[in-house]
Image (spheres, grey):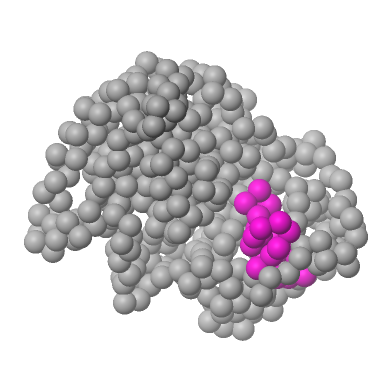
Amino acid sequence: MTLSQTELLARYPGEHAVSADAIRACWEGAVLIVSDDDPTGTQAVRNVIVLTSWQIPDFEWAYAEIEKGHGPPAVFVETNSRSLGPQDAAERNAEIVRNSIAAARHAGIRVRFASRSDSTLRGHFPAETDVIAATLAELGEPEITAVLLAMAFPEAGRVTIGGVHYLRGPGDQLVGAGESEFARDASFSYRSSRLADYAVERSGREIKVTELDLHAVRAGPDAVAGKLLRLANGSLVAVDSVCEDDLRAVALGALRSGTNFLPRCGPSFVRALIGQAPGAPLTRAETRAGSRPCALGGLIVVGSHVSLSTRQLEHLRLHAPGTVFVEMCVDDLFDATSSGTGHSRSAASIAASIAASVAKSNVVLYSSRTQRAGQDAASSLRIARTVSRGLTRIVAEVVDAVTPRFVIAKGGITSHDIARDGLRMRRAVVAGCLQPGIVALWRPADGPVADVPYAVFPGNVGDDTTLVEVVDLLSSPQLVSSQASRGEAR
């Protein structure tokens, strides 16, 4: 069932303007550690440090860069926990808390935490926020007073109104998240669109949830602070938000309350919480700033299987003449795994072919579109990891042979594995976005593609043309013009 956003909002007050400057003034030297369950969470911020490794020296490096003034006081730590089982996800989050705290104590700084996850509600909740809170308590840190379930991501059309989380369709039509294709995810399925019911459903236990609705949010930050101060420690709060000012009102109110809150949030709330205004998409010149010389063509890797990703892939095939398309057959990959070789027989030849082609044209490496589903959530995650590893091995061989002009990775698990294992980057900086708030561009600080633009492209954002637009933006002008002429000749 679809609803009109305009009609839903008619019963609530108008937006309460909140400045990003007021939020920044509240930080006073603290650093926000964002435990991000896949790299797509960085799409709403800019100039922020990203780690795909979370050892103590990695945090020490990040804190030192922030101290030098290199970006806002936040560090995204890419856990890839959405690709893991619940126990492994919990252990990874606990390790990040311990190591970030150890480095912070040595540096003499305060840290806060946020658990960033998918705005379509797929992920290990409440397991991840539970373990962050428990680990902080074990380390003698202040108790978490409230978990803020702030999942709105307005740029991608995800909003929360009256405690219900919606996805925007055509025009101002909204559909409950529990009715979307994402709710049928093989690993993180759910039925409830109301966040309070979703929390109970995902936890398997009764949880008391307080709803912070738009009446309270749009009464302003002080009203939000007052609501939070009246809560018992350990409360779970479902947060309404429709726009940037809503997110800022919640962020500023939470900071002013003085409580030790822990957000479980979508990408936009992190930006609001660090007092950063939405930035304009990067220009073609800005995407190349500081980049090193490289091949003429870029490498586009598509692992995401959601229907939107497949449509975007087909649109690129139709509208990018001269682009080379290379399929990694998933069946071959699983045949290799079952035979014990652990590597598709064709992987080496695929990598060699891509390396030769990328010297003169853009190349798309994609997994075959026939999706395998496991018998349960754990087996579905294993399948997703196997496919991602297959793509990653090919990418690693390609970048050992040639430096692409850029790399785009489409899909959450895909983008993490390509970054960490295919491109072997441990540290990077988010330069900004390539589409308004939905596709992040990283500048790797290490690895074989250091200083080569790396675009993190979620599977579930944009429209059918967005991938074509991002590829055009990152491509060399001569390649774009030659492709356009070939398209006209057709």
Q: Quadrant of the C terminus?
A: top left
Image quadrant in which you'd find residue 320: top left
State the extent of the magenta-drawn residues as a range.
153-175
The residue nearer to you, when weighing 273 against 345, is 345
Q: Quadrant of the N terminus?
A: bottom right
> What residue lies at 56% left-to-right and 69% top-to-bottom?
180
The residue nearer to you, when weighing 475 against 321, is 321
> What residue lies at 35% left-to-right and 76% top-to-bottom?
376
Q: Is residue 54 visible?
A: no
The residue nearer to you, when weighing 315 against 192, is 315
The residue nearer to you, when weighing 467 against 222, is 467
Is residue 401 in the magenta section?
no
* Residue 353 image position (x, y, % from top left): 19, 34
Quick check: 241 left or right of 332? right
Q: Is residue 303 visible?
A: yes
> What residue lies at 54% left-to-right and 19% top-to-bottom?
285
Is residue 158 in the magenta section?
yes
* Residue 140 image position (x, y, % from top left): 58, 58
Q: Extreme front residue here?
A: 490
* Residue 93 image position (x, y, % from top left): 47, 57
Quick check: 51 left or right of 216? left
* Residue 241 image position (x, y, % from top left): 75, 58
Quick check: 268 left or right of 410? right
